[in-house]
Image: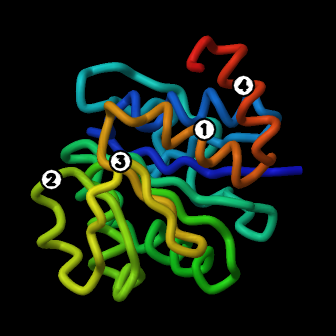
Amino acid sequence: MVKVAVFLANGFEEAEALVPADLLRRAGAEVLLVSVDGEETVTGAHGICVKADCPIESLDRTSLSCVMLPGGMPGTEKLYESFKVRTLVQYAAENGLYVAAICAAPSILGKMGLLDGRRYACYPGFEKEIPDGIRTGKKVEQDDIFVTAEGMGVAFEFGFHLVELLFGSARAAELKTQTRFA
């Protein structure tokens, strides 16, 4: 079973978390919306409240296929400040799990040194947090296990890219047709 953890901290960008989560669930993944601060409800950057599936403390990292970091402010800063989030991201990277980040969140990977020498995408202005990476200018970029994207406007492309990685191109194409994306 494909299992994806989407880390949520107060101030996350709602579309960047929920669009990919929705697409991954439609594809057949078990997607866990994980509360970083342990609260049952997490409030997005635009005031939308989301009920988390579990607190970060109860997440079983050994069953994961992918971890995902949405952007948004101050959500991205709170994700980076969380030792538990950084530990789980490091675990994912060391164990070959997909690590996905969108908008400002690739800066977390940059600060951790995980994008050094790697191609990436991020929201304009956050490349200063990734000085040793290679910003390609693509809306969605993949380098090995790292998948990054520019921002909310490419949340669907980001989500479909993750579906393709985890379920194959046929399933991604089927979902694009079902959702009228293509």
Q: At label 2, which amino acid type do we have?
A: Pro
Q: Judging from the image, what secondary structure is the residue with disc 4 in? A: helix
Q: Judging from the image, what secondary structure is the residue with disc 3 in? A: loop
* Residue toward you, 76 or 22: 22
User: Quadrant of the rendered structure where residue 110 is?
Assistant: bottom left
Question: Which circle's residue, 1 or 3, is located before the other in the chain?
Answer: 3
Q: Which residue is mark 4?
A: 175
* Residue toward you, 132 or 101: 132
Q: Is residue 100 left or right of residue 171?
A: left
Residue 139, label in figure: 3
Within 10 Å of the Cα at label 3, are there few (<14), some (14-19), or many (20+) other Cα atoms?
A: many
Q: At label 1, which amino acid type do we have?
A: Phe
Residue 173 vs 10, above or below: the answer is above
Residue 42, label in figure: none
Q: Judging from the image, what secondary structure is the residue with disc 1 in? A: helix
Q: Which residue is mark 2?
A: 124
Question: Which circle's residue, 3 or 2, is located before the other in the chain?
Answer: 2
Residue 160, label in figure: 1
Work out how far the residue at label 1 is from the one at label 3, CA to CA, in angstroms.
13 Å
Within 10 Å of the Cα at label 4, are there few (<14), some (14-19), or many (20+) other Cα atoms?
A: many
Residue found at x 59% / y 46%? 161
